[in-house]
């Protein structure tokens, strides 16, 4: 199957290329870049020398629709909403790694993304691609809104607790930490090596655009209006997200009981690994892989549940989950092309 | 004034040496090390070559009491409680960087430190050295219990809010992050470079020994029994602590109002810097210095106050505050020997 | 085909497991560890949770010879030389990632490895597995001495120049830099995170045990007795080796000419990538992959050739090349199981 | 004494501020920035909040000459050569951290700096400020050309060997490594955290502008025309330079003999520390300080001398040496304001 990737100079695109290189059913026919059309990929990413011998091209919707069956958008916000509609009308399925089709509330989109939301008929079509939760609807998706990195780690950590009523869903606090690659390849003083190394920062406190996405996902699942506190921080490392989540337990649970429920909840999901009692996962234990690892601690002293959920932000938090969703959309084994162990150390 | 440092091979000791090198009133007469008695400091710490030309010696309480007026303990837990009593009886003042004299509850000490607490007459004498808060009692201290690193960052961040009744003191959640030097110089697979770099971990979830210390400090201030949730994490960097603190606001405050209260609270304290609205401090901005920098965000949407407090764990979180306390004990300007800018980048 | 890995707690072993996980012809039947026999792999390497569900066992040569066809030794020095002979006698092929069978000079072995060399009949059998150079002899190897990390990067960088007489082979200086994982998982103050991060060190200046290995390889190729200067350094990063090599050019070459020779030399070798003029490879461009990337600069001003050769020390410098050699030994495509792109960023 | 700093947003300026903060004889009256005139320093460098309460201003030569006695230039190349002449004519002494006044060869300046050299009457006045070597001429300098970071580490490592005839001065190869801060605060993809961390790179191979500076210094000392091979690399850390230097020994020396000569050469120079036999300094051992630490290894096997010289590139390699030179110019103790221990860990 021929596919295209739009956003060829970003980290999302190179991670797609890395996994698709080992995917037996997919051929990357085009890599499209607005800013680097005409340039060889290896000039922009020397690690691809001799192995991804592709010249980037400009976007032409009509020819693209004839050449490929599926398009991945690894673009900044407010790009895909202007392109996906016409591709979908021509029968091309689209997987969007950006946030354009995730929210179903126009005001929130305007508030957090600064523009008007995509036309409603396409928002209505869009399926939110949290693979472990929405598998059935993903199968039929023509527009797949691939979840954000923080929302993926956070939702996978919280969903069993919310669905089973283990916590007071109005008491959720999420203290999240990401590696620097989450900020992409765009230059910024904050991510200049000398200023970022040996440094730890909170950022966008109270105003991060993943807040409405997390709230929407949790609210839809629980059929109540959930508000969360969410504070992102950046860690001096390239990859990895940890969400440390706090919530009041609805009863006097012990860690072991809760782990059993989580184990059972995720037993058919190969990319979620619930750790045994006393073990809290670290980000490096999922480095480069599509796993989401979860640890729990029921603090009986204070009645709080502490959930720790880790992913590689560029894999399960972006390109890996996108491929997992593609696999589901085409009826292939979920793990196709993604069955790689974490790189350690 | 002649002083001694006990615990000469630890990071606490070398930071004391760094600042005392520039202290006009103090001469480090002895560096005592159980494991390295007879060894030159520069053999263990080559960066001290030619500048701290001291041979480490073994501990002999009687001669020590004659040679120095003050002793710093930069020792592991459960060491100083066996030595300080006899030194104090001989008229030597002691500043203890370990946790032995911080808690005033024998059961908690037993639970978190695994041994019996020091004899009560010495616990009663001990002054908790949070310099900005206990200045008056510190002046007279013969046993100075220097606060832990997390408790320092956390208490300085919370105290104005608690004292002024700005938050519900039963709603406090502390998500804390430290650089690796907080774990000291002892070898451990967790802190082996290849396993710690490009990694982020939570540890001792729910059981860290700074929990009772934080609770005691806040409870004494507020005259209520405060319980906190406290989760420490370790960041792939050497120095720096950030406490991200969440609490319910007791009224509908705006960030600006709260910052004014904090500014006014700390206006006479040169080592606490409250940042302007919209600015959250990062750990590197206090690197190598004795500052504690604080930022606030009043989340009007959810009614939560988010407090971010950063220190260098080895300075304001240990050796720097110890020297600040010594300055107070001897009536010198608080900043003597400590008036150095953060190293940046 | 069933294989075993001896040395189950080291980084060599986990990298073998990572690549063999995707190898279509190989099943890892046993992971043998002296120190962790009876322990689950995932207890020692949590990143392997649920994906490498193996309990480590102790070494029993007789049963091992019945269970597997091939054994990988990822052991410290002076272990495999005591085990490989009996396995080989029972018809088991052995790939040794340690240095025991690399040198063909007993005195040098004694000098650099501190023990007597393996029995001569086995040394004579051993094939030095620099895959790109010794392909024909590797096919028949029963004992495969997998090259060291520095010798791999260095020899691949130098061989075309030596074979084609482009340099004075008595003028070679190698300034080499490695990531910390090259030192393995054993604890040491030098590799304690707080002492290794933000630090750069030379070590074992003039006495590193890869010196005789490099000299033997180059001398055998050139049929002269080559001596090299070799200085290793350690970089605050996990993975990657760079050899920066200096030698006098034998004539007035230009960079372009030399690159053409190198390109042609390596044209049938998929894992060596010679970079275009003006491009010097960086270590991260081969991260996690089996590539060796080479850049050249002919300094016409001084008559020196500067060769920069980079590999991932744990892959092409150890486990990756071991699997490449296994593929050659069994007549499979060299890239089987190894065809993965570098992880970037 | 009132001084000014030009180039207020660079790392050179902030390091000057850090040390001058503790200098008893100097007051920083003005910080001048072309791009940030009118801005508070603390807005650009939040770590200076409350401690360097200065608003940056634009350059006005006439008023500046009335307000200060001395000006530090921490500017990019080709700036100071247009300003220093008029300041000097008005009697202001200038210390130039840039390269504008270092070279005494107009062609070389044009070749490596891309513009015409400063007017000859000012080049003739300029004193090259390698403090340990040129102390007498520095005293009278009106234009002080502060050495480059690589040339400082390299020259201090080589000078005793060259002056005493210990090496063949035509055989010098310098393999140098720097922390990232050497590249300054300007944004570049190469120094974007995600691309620089866990990476090691050579750069500007054969063409770095410190080559003519090193050659000029060594040639002037030896009264011969010395050519060197110099290859710079960048290490994923903020601070630190190591020069690993190779040269043919002129006789059969042993390490100990050479160390004695070096010790004796530097015995009156407090900022150069020659390490004992068997000890090679690491960059972190001079972190944040003005030391240059040197280790030697005489490789009797090959007749090569290996010299390892380390500095903090921002201190002895820039701002620290600038202040050391100021101290010499004004007859103050060389260590004034600089007597700080390295920060470790």
Image (cartoon, coloured by chain):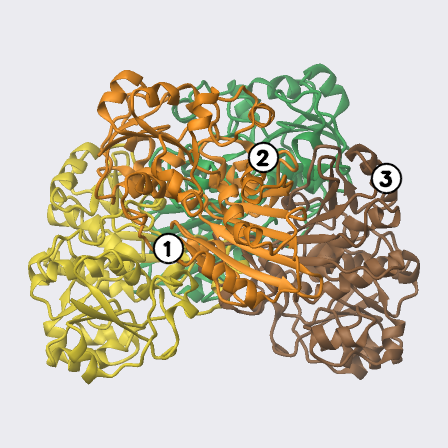
Chain colours: A orange, B brown, C yellow, D green
Q: What residue is shown with label 2?
A: A212
Q: Nearer the viewer, residue C254 or C19?
A: C19
**Does residue D97 appear in this view?**
yes
Q: Chain of mark 1?
A: A
Q: Quadrant of residue D96?
A: top right
In this rendering, the label closer to the viewer, 3 or 2: 2
Which quarter of the rendered picture does the C terminus of chain B lie within? top right
Give the residue displayed 57% in from the left and 39% down from the top.
D318
In this rendering, the label closer to the viewer, 3 or 1: 1
Q: Nearer the viewer, residue B299 or D168?
A: B299
Whether pointer 3 and pointer 2 mark residues with C-beta atoms closer than 8 Å, the reply is: no
Q: Is residue D269 above or below residue B259?
A: below
Q: Few, some or many C-alpha atoms within 10 Å of disc 1 (few <14, some 14-19, many ≥20)?
A: some
Q: Is residue D6 left or right of residue C319?
A: right
Q: Which mark is residue A270?
A: 1
Q: Is residue C48 above or below residue A162?
A: below
Q: Chain of mark 3?
A: B
User: For the residues marked 3 and 2, what is the alpha-carbon distance in whole angstroms?
Assistant: 31 Å
Give the residue displayed 39% in from the left and 44% down from the top.
A135
Q: Position of residue D31 (x, y in %)?
A: 69, 27
The tag earlier along the polypeptide, 1 or 2, is 2
Q: Secondary structure at mark 2?
A: helix
Q: Chain of mark 2?
A: A
Q: Nearer the viewer, residue D106 or D78?
A: D78
User: For the residues marked 3 and 1, what is the alpha-carbon distance in whole angstroms?
Assistant: 51 Å
Q: Position of residue D169 (x, y in %)?
A: 35, 46
Q: What residue is shown with label 3?
A: B261
Q: Is residue C46 left or right of residue C25?
A: right
């Amino acid at each position: 199957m021929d596919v295209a990737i739009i956003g060829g100079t970003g980290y999302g695109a190179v991670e797609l290329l890395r996994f698709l290189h080992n995917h037996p059913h997919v051929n990357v026919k085009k890599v499209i870049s607005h800013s680097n059309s005409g340039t060889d990929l290896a000039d922009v990413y020397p690690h691809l020398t001799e192995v991804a011998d592709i010249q980037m091209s400009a976007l032409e919707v009509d020819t693209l629709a004839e050449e490929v069956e599926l398009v991945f958008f690894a673009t900044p916000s407010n790009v895909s909403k202007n392109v996906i509609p016409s591709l979908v009308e021509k029968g091309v399925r689209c997987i969007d790694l950006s946030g354009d089709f995730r929210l179903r509330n126009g005001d929130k989109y305007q508030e957090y993304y600064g523009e008007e939301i995509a036309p409603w008929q396409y928002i209505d079509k869009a399926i939110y691609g949290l693979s472990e939760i929405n598998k059935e609807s993903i199968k039929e998706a023509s527009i797949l809104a691939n979840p954000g990195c923080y929302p993926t780690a956070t939702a996978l950590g919280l969903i069993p607790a919310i669905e089973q009523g283990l916590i007071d869903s109005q008491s959720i606090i999420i203290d999240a930490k990401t590696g620097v690659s989450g900020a992409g390849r765009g230059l910024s003083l904050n991510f200049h090596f000398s200023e970022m190394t040996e440094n730890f920062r909170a950022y966008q406190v109270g105003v991060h655009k993943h807040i409405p996405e997390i709230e929407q996902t949790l609210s839809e699942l629980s059929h109540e209006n959930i508000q969360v506190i969410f504070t992102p921080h950046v860690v001096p490392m390239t990859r990895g997200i940890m969400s440390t989540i706090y919530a009041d337990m609805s009863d006097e649970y012990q860690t072991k009981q809760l782990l059993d429920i989580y184990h059972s909840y995720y037993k058919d999901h190969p990319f979620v690994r619930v750790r045994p009692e006393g073990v809290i996962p670290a980000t490096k234990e999922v480095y480069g892989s599509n796993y989401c690892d979860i640890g729990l601690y029921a603090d009986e002293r204070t009645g709080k549940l502490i959930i720790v959920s880790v992913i590689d932000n560029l894999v399960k938090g972006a390109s890996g989950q996108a491929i997992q969703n593609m696999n589901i959309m085409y009826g292939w084994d979920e793990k196709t092309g993604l069955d790689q162990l974490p790189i350690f150390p």
